Image (cartoon, rainbow, N blue to C red):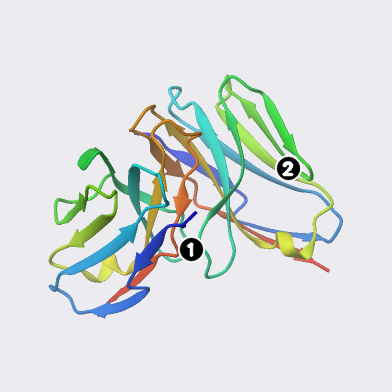
Amino acid sequence: GENVEQHPSTLSVQEGDSAVIKCTYSDSASNYFPWYKQELGKRPQLIIDIRSNVGEKKDQRIAVTLNKTAKHFSLHITETQPEDSAVYFCAASKGSGGYQKVTFGTGTKLQVIP
Amino acid sequence: ETGVTQSPTHLIKTRGQQVTLRCSSQSGHNTVSWYQQALGQGPQFIFQYYREEENGRGNFPPRFSGLQFPNYSSELNVNALELDDSALYLCASSLDRGTGELFFGEGSRLTVL
């Protein structure tokens, strides 16, 4: 089955700096790569996603890149703010229609220091 | 638009007991998935239901079972509870013809003593 590895497990940055989280996946059939943010005691929420036919996607301060050949993808957060502090999960998914199996990474705890 | 709701939010059981967790999908969503999230870990896929049938399962034993009802709500049942079953159980709904985004509930935190 699919295996998703995520690094680092914890990340501390100064407010205003950039943060980068990296993930690798094993199943070349995976075609959808979402990133979820989970604040303490809250539900995971989608912040950005990318499909296998796209190499990069950006949404304001957040960007994701995908290298299908190397099977890795990364999340980039620029101009970090204290409210960015949370656990971030990458995920890889395959399927279509009514079937979709999503495999999550182990998470990165991001702390933005004011 | 109603979001995903789960019940109960917290519960405590003893080893060997059985538990039923419930989930109401987001309005219009016809697919529901269940995930187990141990402390400090990412969500682990348990199974998915589409049109009231299980159509995908992760690496969980048969004592984890589920149902999806005609209104797309769902139940997760766990029999013969073990200490390692202590975790946050997340329900996520999605649309079969949607973007692939999962909409999570707040979860049910199960503690097995």
> Residue A73 placed where, x, y %?
61, 33
Which of discs 1 and 2 lies nearer the camera? The answer is 2
The answer to whether residue A1 is left or right of residue B112 is right
**Quick check: A79 left or right of A86?**
right
Compared with A62, B98 (above or below) is: above
Q: Chain of mark 1?
A: B
Q: Which quarter of the picture shows residue B5?
A: bottom left
SS at mark 1 in the image? loop
Using the image, determine if residue A18 lies above or below residue A40.
above
Residue A80 screen position, x and y as percent: 80, 55
User: Looking at the image, which residue is at 40% across and 48% down?
Assistant: B93
Return the residue nearer the eye: B71 or A31: B71
**Looking at the figure, which quarter contains the C terminus of chain B?**
bottom left
Query: SS of the residue at dot 2?
Result: strand
Asked where in the image residue A23 lies, by quadrant, the reply is top right
| Number of numbered discs overlaid on the protein picture | 2
Question: Measured from the top left, where is residue B55 in percent x and y?
Answer: 24, 36
Q: Which residue is mark 1?
A: B40
| Chain assignment, label 2 | A
Q: Residue A76 shows which numbered tag?
A: 2
Looking at the picture, which amino acid does disc 2 mark?
His
Asked whether the beta carbons under mark 1 and mark 2 sit within 8 Å of each other, the answer is no
| Disc 1 and disc 2 on one polypeptide chain | no
Pointer 1 local density, CA inside 10 Å: few below 14, some 14–19, many at least 20: few
Q: Residue furthest right?
A: A16
Q: Is residue B67 left or right of residue A97?
A: left
Residue at 73% across, 42% down: A76
Quarter holding residue A95: top left
- The dot on residue A102 is none
